[in-house]
């Protein structure tokens, strides 16, 4: 959020400095901070909300992965980088969910 052009270089390449790219990074950045902050707060103060918040984050990351995969006319590097980053967070969130007490393993 502080340096959106720098943070988006992997995904947007030279377009990372465009105003539309920077504003998108900032809006998505606050979403991540809000979900992550809620999750950290729940760990301490509302343990029953940890799993729903974690899963909400995974759903958001699945959405992001699909958006990168399905949006027409994206440069290959943007599509690949976006899918890798968002997909990586999907996997991390799913693995974290499996570590919570009461997780059902398949």
Image (tube, grey):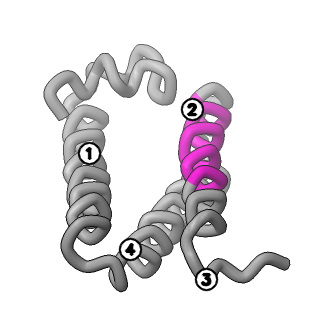
Eyeballing the image, is 29 above or below 75? below
Lower sequence index among marks 4 and 3: 4
**Marks 4/1: CA distance?**
20 Å
Q: Earlier in the sequence, mark 2 or mark 4?
A: 4
Choose between 87 and 19: the one closer to the eye: 87
Tell me the number on the disc at residue 102: 3
Rendered image quadrant of residue 54 = bottom left
Residue 39 falls in image quadrant: bottom left
What's the CA distance linking mark 4 and mark 3?
Answer: 12 Å
Q: Secondary structure at mark 3?
A: loop
Height in image: 103 above or below 39?
A: below
Which residue shows up at 43% across the image and 65% down it? 57
Q: Which residue is mark 2?
A: 78
The first of marks 4 and 1 along the sequence is: 1
User: Closer to us: mark 3 or mark 1?
Assistant: 3
Q: Which mark is residue 29?
A: 1
Question: Of callouts 1 and 2, which one flags the residue occurring earlier in the amino acid sequence?
Answer: 1
Tag 1, which secondary structure? Answer: helix
The numbered disc on residue 50 is 4
* Front of the two marks 4 and 3: 3
Viewed as shown, does residue 56 lie left or right of 42?
A: right
């Amino acid at each position: 959020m502080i340096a959106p052009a720098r943070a988006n270089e992997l995904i947007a390449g030279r377009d990372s400095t465009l105003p539309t790219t920077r504003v998108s990074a900032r809006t998505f950045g606050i979403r991540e901070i809000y979900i992550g902050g809620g999750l950290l707060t729940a760990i301490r103060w509302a343990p029953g909300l940890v799993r729903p918040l974690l899963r909400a984050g995974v759903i958001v990351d699945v959405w992001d992965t699909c958006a990168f995969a399905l949006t027409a006319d994206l440069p290959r590097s943007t599509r690949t980088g976006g899918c890798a980053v968002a997909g990586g967070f999907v996997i991390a969130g799913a693995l974290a969910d499996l570590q919570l007490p009461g997780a059902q393993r398949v």
